[in-house]
Amino acid sequence: MKRAIIIVIDSMGIGAMQDCSEFNDIPECNTLKNVCKFNNGLNLPTMSKMGLGNIDDYEGIEKTQTPIAQYGTMVEKSKGKDTTTGHWEIAGYISEKPFATFPEGFPDELVEKFIKETGCGGILANIPASGTVIIEQLNEEHQKTKFPIVYTSADSVFQIAVDTDIIPLETLYKWCTIARRLLDEGNYNVSRVIARPYKVINGKPTRISKDRRDYSMAPPHTLLDDIKNKGGKVIGIGKIEDIFAKKGITHAVHTGTNKEGLELTIKAIKNELDLNKIAYENKNYGEPTLIFTNLVDTDMLFGHRNDAVGYGKAIEEIDNYLSIILGELSDDDLLIITADHGCDPTVPGTDHTREKVPVLIYNKTINGKDLGVLDGFDHVAKFIKDWIF
């Protein structure tokens, strides 16, 4: 049976969209191009062979006359520049109404309900902020009061940070579940509640990526539902399970690093994952199969932290693994590599950027070609439907 694999390189945008100013971005934002330039070129032989370098002039990424994949640019239809909007559109759903943002912090009514229902006693911050910065600024007060650090960003997120040596991880997750319910009951239209656990390591507050969890709004009908409803498998690797609020997912495994996510993807392709351990239900799932992987380090560790060097190294690491992945694919496998938005570490600010994204489509039996500019990330869902149904 035919199978599809989607790998999302989180935030690897390739140029500002025409409406970027509406999202407080500048026309100069271009995550991949600027990261390449900052690093005096990147070494991406696998994606170069696939045609990535043919999309634009990227320092260090060679163009090829004989691409082994179909390549192109996708322009987002949805109104947003966040993880949820991008992934939902990749899976076929267009978000016409933007999620709500809170540049002045969350309203008092919501905060009061959160404090009352969690019993946390109070909160710190309630402002838009960089997560790494805010926990450093407020860690000492957090240690004294044990109040959670609640903050947002330019995205539609309600983020809760705690030192899990002070507040147990299970309590943090419970508080996030309560926040999700309150937001839904109040029709606040907030995309995600994010658990941001950290520990003080060598005197420095350090976020624990593997224990992060996202509590998303449930999406309407997507490609994932189509596959699951036909009795197929949808294997979410990384934060896919959270982004889709488990809807349309049959199996899921969280990851702490891109390396772990890539190695799990290879295991899934080779049918070496213990699916019984990561299945939601005790039932036999058949075909078709979708393996859906999110590689978050580019965004979370490097884009938001303005670390262009780390960002470049992360892309190179992905490229190294892609050479292994291509070798494991059969004639019945369709691999699609793309991104969900931008997060240019070289421009002012630490927020996502409203950008177009690349798409690379590979199968051993399909000839490489230029797909040009495609209107909508939902072309990924269309390609997969045409392949497996």
Image: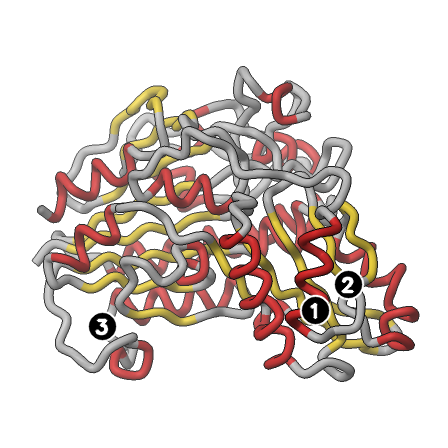
Q: Distance between the residues labelled 2 and 1?
A: 16 Å
Toward the viewer: 361 or 245?
245
Q: Is residue 43 visible?
A: no
Element assignment for label 2? strand
Q: Residue at x 53, y 29 (%)?
A: 355
Q: Name the residue under label 3.
A: 271
Please tell me which of labels 2 and 1 falls first in the chain. Answer: 1
Q: Residue 258's x, y, as percent?
A: 51, 62
Please tell me which of labels 3 and 1 falls first in the chain. Answer: 1
Q: Can residue 330 be seen in this view?
A: yes
Q: Residue at x 64, y 54 (%)?
A: 158
Q: Residue 256's x, y, as percent?
A: 55, 70
In this rendering, position of residue 121 left or right of residue 154 = right
Toward the viewer: 44 or 235?
235
Q: Residue 155's x, y, as percent?
A: 62, 41
Q: How far apart are marks 3 and 1 (CA)?
A: 47 Å
Q: Which residue is drawn at 59% across and 22% down?
A: 20
